[in-house]
């Protein structure tokens, strides 16, 4: 009996793998195919773009290039007034469009969250703009604002060249993006609203809280993690905007962005080194914003989730 008791009380022996592989080694072995695939799909194009950005290519002699170091980053990027204008337009587009999308998306999410007859139909209709292809959205908005016989000019009785002058062109690009992407924000915020317990609102009603007090002191604080996630997704996506301004205005009349100017330099003008440098600069800006979100906002999300 004592022997059995000693065996029961003794710690379990450490299991050894028959092939001698530790758990960490086995994990690396199983993850390595995916990491190799990611490196081929994502890392290699970035590395090749960096290599191109450090050279200046000749379109007259195929394959002829010379090393210029970081000169392309200065001449075609930081000291280039066109690139600085594209950066300014990109920042304006990002701040304005994301702000409107969060406000409108929050209102749409609150409306879809309420229980009423036809709730499923409303959710379906609200998500239709998000399901439309971005190029189709751009063509539709261009048709609406084309001069002089577009839908908007016909309704207003004007002959305004909306897509041919500033700041109207940038405003239309922002409106088109808000129309298309607000349902995406609404979908994310609706998911956040559905995890808030109804008992909290019932207790607030018993305490005499008004609808506005419930929204400010219950809904918004508990919805902050979902709002911050939506902000991260949309901000990073807006900084890389290309299709809407390209289809609507070809990136002209005050609608150039970091993506459109790098595409024009690289593909249209065939300045491969300069275009690659502009693309890498855009990549660095997006990465800086990503790290800022992760560093300052990601910690808040983890803290609020833990609470």
Image (cartoon, helix red, strand yellow):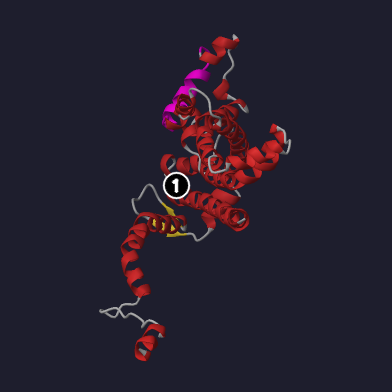
Is residue 253 visible to us here?
A: no
Return the residue found at the far left: 19
Residue 231 location in percent, x, y? Answer: 57, 44
- The one nearer the camera, 60 or 85, is 85
Q: Indicate the quadrant containing the C terminus: top left, top right, bottom left or bottom right.
A: bottom right
- The one nearer the camera, 176 or 216, is 216
Residue 166 location in percent, x, y? Answer: 62, 27
Return the residue found at the far right: 208
- Residue shown at the point (60%, 41%) measured from the top left: 199
Residue 241 location in percent, x, y? Answer: 50, 39
- Residue shown at the point (43%, 49%) measured from the top left: 272
Q: Is residue 266 magenta?
A: no
Is residue 174 visible to us here?
A: yes
Residue highlighted by disc 1: 271
Q: Secondary structure at mark 1?
A: loop
- The one nearer the camera, 142 or 235, is 235
**Relative to residue 157, is residue 12 drawn left or right?**
left
- Residue shown at the point (37%, 60%) measured from the top left: 39
Return the residue found at the far front: 1
**Relative to residue 218, is residue 64 drawn left or right?**
left
Q: Is residue 142 magenta?
A: yes
**Relative to residue 25, is residue 251 drawn left or right?**
right
Q: Indicate the quadrant containing the N terminus: top left, top right, bottom left or bottom right.
A: bottom left
Please name the predominant secondary structure of the magenta segment in the image.
helix
Residue 114 location in percent, x, y? Answer: 56, 30
Q: Is residue 228 above or below residue 256?
A: below
In magenta, the rendered stretch is 132-149
- Residue shown at the point (51%, 52%) measured from the top left: 283
Bin the neighbour count of mark 1 within 10 Å (Cα to Cα): few under 14, some 14-19, many 20 and up: many
Circle count: 1
């Amino acid at each position: 009996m004592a022997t059995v008791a000693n065996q029961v009380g003794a710690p379990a022996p450490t299991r050894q793998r028959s092939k001698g592989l530790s758990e960490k080694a086995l994990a690396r072995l199983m993850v390595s195919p995916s990491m190799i695939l990611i490196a081929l799909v994502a890392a290699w194009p970035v590395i090749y773009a960096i290599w191109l950005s450090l050279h200046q290519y000749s379109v007259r002699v195929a394959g002829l290039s010379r090393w210029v170091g970081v000169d392309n980053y200065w001449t075609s990027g930081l000291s280039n007034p066109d690139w600085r204008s594209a950066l300014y337009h990109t920042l304006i587009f990002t701040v304005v469009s994301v702000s409107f999308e969060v406000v409108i998306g929050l209102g749409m999410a609150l409306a879809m969250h309420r229980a009423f007859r036809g709730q499923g139909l409303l959710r379906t209709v609200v998500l239709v703009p998000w399901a439309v292809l971005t190029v189709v959205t751009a063509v539709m908005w261009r048709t609406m604002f084309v001069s002089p016989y577009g839908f908007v000019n016909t309704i207003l009785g004007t002959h305004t060249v909306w897509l041919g002058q500033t700041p109207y062109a940038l405003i239309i690009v922002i409106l088109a993006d808000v129309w298309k992407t607000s349902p995406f924000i609404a979908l994310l915020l609706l998911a956040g609203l559905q995890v808030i317990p109804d008992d909290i609102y019932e207790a607030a009603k018993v305490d005499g809280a008004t609808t506005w007090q419930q929204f400010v002191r219950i809904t918004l604080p508990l919805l902050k993690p979902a709002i911050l996630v939506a902000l991260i997704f949309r901000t990073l996506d807006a900084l890389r905007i290309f299709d809407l301004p390209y289809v609507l205005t070809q990136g002209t009349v005050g609608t150039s962005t970091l993506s459109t100017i790098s595409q024009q330099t690289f593909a249209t003008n065939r300045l491969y080194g300069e275009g690659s440098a502009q693309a890498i600069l855009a990549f660095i800006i997006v990465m800086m914003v990503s790290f800022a979100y992760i560093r300052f906002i990601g910690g808040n999300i983890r803290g609020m989730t833990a609470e």
